């Protein structure tokens, strides 16, 4: 579905995450901001100080998500950042982020958009702490990047719809009012990030 790496959306998601979920002062700041500034009303602007990490040097990016490794010749598309119309977002600061999420388990739940964001966040942390050891492991449903010295765990759980699916009268039924079966697997995360891309692709599912 998404053939290319999308560090841009990860930057936005994680900047918002950094602003909104970890630090109490930042929450107040964001709430105040919110009155004047719709963070979602804005545009992508060219900024030559980006990208935040070198995709070609980050082994966490899967082959299928690396545009360059698959032959894309231009680089300019990486140099965009999100600019809300009525305020400025702070630039991502990997060290600051690392301090704030130390000891935390961050889990992305969703389809390949979440997979892109999980890989990108791993690369962003790596770029901020180039000497910090890390390991990554994959099972069918859960992938994990662990930075043991930083004590940061990034998880990606493949789960495109999240809602429970029951089999009734030999048909699969999507239970829109229930996420219980999947939610058990999220309970041990400190920060959860969902995406809904697949909901917008299909009809009749
Ligand atoms: C990592 O963080 C967890 C959760 O805050 C904590 O219980 C644990 O002691 C930490 N481990 C290290 C090695 O600092």
Image (cartoon, rainbow, N blue to C red):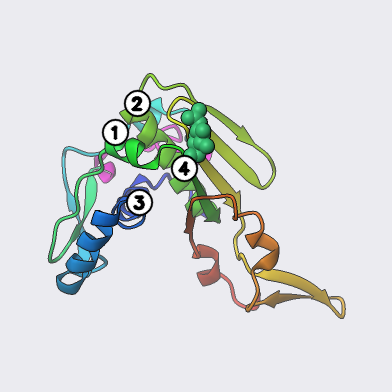
- Badge 3: residue crowd in 10 Å (few <14, some 14–19, many ≥20): some
Give the Cα separation between the discs numbered 1 and 2.
7 Å
Q: 199 or 148, which lies in front?
A: 148
Q: Earlier in the sequence, mark 4 or mark 3?
A: 3
Main SS class of the magenta portion in the image: loop
Q: In the image, is 129 to the left or to the right of 139?
A: left
Q: Is residue 162 above or below residue 121?
A: below
Q: Which residue is mark 3?
A: 22
Q: What number of labels is visible? A: 4
Q: Secondary structure at mark 1?
A: helix
Residue 204 point in image, percent of width and height: 65, 78
Q: Which residue is mark 2?
A: 129
- Give me the residue at 24% from left, 41% from top: 76
The answer to the question of whether label 4 and label 3 lie on touching residues, with beta carbons closer than 8 A, is no
Q: Nearer the viewer, mark 2 or mark 3?
A: 3
Q: Is residue 29 above or below residue 169?
A: above
Does the image show residue 48? yes
Residue 174 point in image, percent of width and height: 69, 75
Q: Which residue is mark 1?
A: 95
Q: Is residue 62 above or below residue 202?
A: above
Mark 4 residue's CB less than 8 Å from ligand 1: yes
Q: Earlier in the sequence, mark 1 or mark 2?
A: 1
Q: Secondary structure at mark 3?
A: helix
Q: Earlier in the sequence, mark 1 or mark 3?
A: 3
- Give me the residue at 29% from left, 33% from top: 95
Q: Earlier in the sequence, mark 2 or mark 3?
A: 3
- Badge 1: residue crowd in 10 Å (few <14, some 14–19, many ≥20): few
Residue 104 has which mark?
4
Q: Earlier in the sequence, mark 1 or mark 4?
A: 1
Q: In the image, is 2 to the left or to the right of 46?
A: right
């Amino acid at each position: 579905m998404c053939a290319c790496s999308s560090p841009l959306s990860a930057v936005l998601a994680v900047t918002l995450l950094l602003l909104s979920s970890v630090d109490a002062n930042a929450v107040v700041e964001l709430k105040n901001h919110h009155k004047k500034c719709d963070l979602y009303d804005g545009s992508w602007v060219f900024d030559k100080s980006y990208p935040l990490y070198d995709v070609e040097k980050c082994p966490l990016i899967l082959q299928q998500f690396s545009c360059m490794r698959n032959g894309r010749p231009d680089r300019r598309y990486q140099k965009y950042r999100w600019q809300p119309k009525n305020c400025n977002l702070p630039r991502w600061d990997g060290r600051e982020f690392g301090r704030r999420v130390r000891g935390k388990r961050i889990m992305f739940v969703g389809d390949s958009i979440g997979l892109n964001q999980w890989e990108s966040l791993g690369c962003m942390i790596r770029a901020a702490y180039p000497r910090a050891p890390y390991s990554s492991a994959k099972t069918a449903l859960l992938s994990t990047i662990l930075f043991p010295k930083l004590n940061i765990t990034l998880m990606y759980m493949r789960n495109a719809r999240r809602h429970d699916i029951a089999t009734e009268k030999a048909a699969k039924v999507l239970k829109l009012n229930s996420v219980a079966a999947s939610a058990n697997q999220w309970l041990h995360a400190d920060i959860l990030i969902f995406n809904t891309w697949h909901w917008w692709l299909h009809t009749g599912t």
